[in-house]
Image (cartoon, helix red, strand yellow):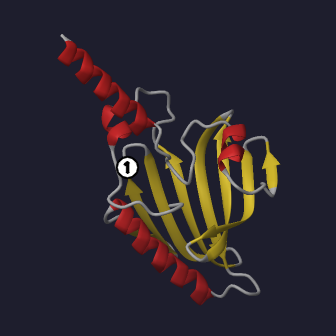
Amino acid sequence: MKKIILICLLLSSRLASAQQSPDIRQVRWGFSPAQVKQAETIKPSSTRSEKIIYARVPLVNRTVGLEYTFNGDSLLSASYYYYTTAVITQADVTTAAGELKALLTEKYGPGKTANVGEIQNTVWLTPRTQVNLSLGNVDKGWSLEIVYLCRVCSGEPVPPAANTWRPRKEVKDL
C-alpha cells in the first residue's frame, strides 16, 4: 500500500512539474495579461485590450518586436516580427530567417514548408503549440514573423501527451 501511495505521489509531482514548463519565453498558454507582464523583464511599449506589444526585445543577437494576443484574459498567441527598415536590409531579414529556422528545427525537428505566393511558411506542431515561421516580401518590404499559436485553448480536454512532451533541444526564447 505504501508503495502505491509513493508511486502516485511521484507521478503526480512529475505531472505537476511538467505542466509548469513554459510554452514560449517564460509564459504559458492561458496566462493573463498581468502574468505575462510579470514574466517579461522589460516594460511593454503598448498595451491594448487584447494585446501587449514589446517593440524591442532581444532574440538571437537581434532586436525584434514581440506581440502577445489574448482571448479575453487568456494568452492565445505570441508573435516575433523583424522587417526591413532604413537600417535592416533584405539580406538581414533573410539571414535571420535562416538562423531562426535552423534553431527551431533543432528544437522541434523538421517543419513542413510550403510557399504561399511570395511567402515561405514553415510550420512545426507540438501537442500544445503550432509554430509558424513566415518569410516574404509583403506590403512595404521583406518581413519575418514567427507566430506561436495555442493548440489547447479551445476548452477541449488537454491530452496527457501535451503536458509531458519535451522539445529535442531547449533554445532560449524560442
Residue sitting farthest toward the top: 1
112 vs 4, left or right, is right
Q: Is residue 85 above or below residue 82?
A: below
Residue 87 image point, x, y percent: 73, 87
Q: Is residue 67 above or below residue 32?
A: below
Answer few, some or many: residues within 10 Å of disc 1's Cα (few below 14, many 20 plus, some between 14 and 19). Answer: some
At x 72%, y 38%, the residue is: 34
37 vs 154, left or right, is right
Residue 108 image point, x, y percent: 36, 60
Figure quadrant of residue 19: top left
Residue 104 image point, x, y percent: 42, 66
Q: Is residue 24 above or below residue 13?
A: below
Residue on which the image places disc 1: 126
Q: Amino acid at mark 1?
A: Thr
Q: Is residue 122 above or below residue 127?
A: below
Residue 110 image point, x, y percent: 31, 66
Q: Can you see residue 113?
A: no
Work out whether residue 78 or residue 142 is closer to the camera in this orientation and state it. Answer: 78
Q: Can you see residue 54?
A: yes
In the rendered image, which quarter contains the N terminus? Answer: top left
At x 52%, y 53%, the residue is: 148
At x 42%, y 43%, the residue is: 128
14 vs 136, left or right, is left
Numbered marks: total: 1
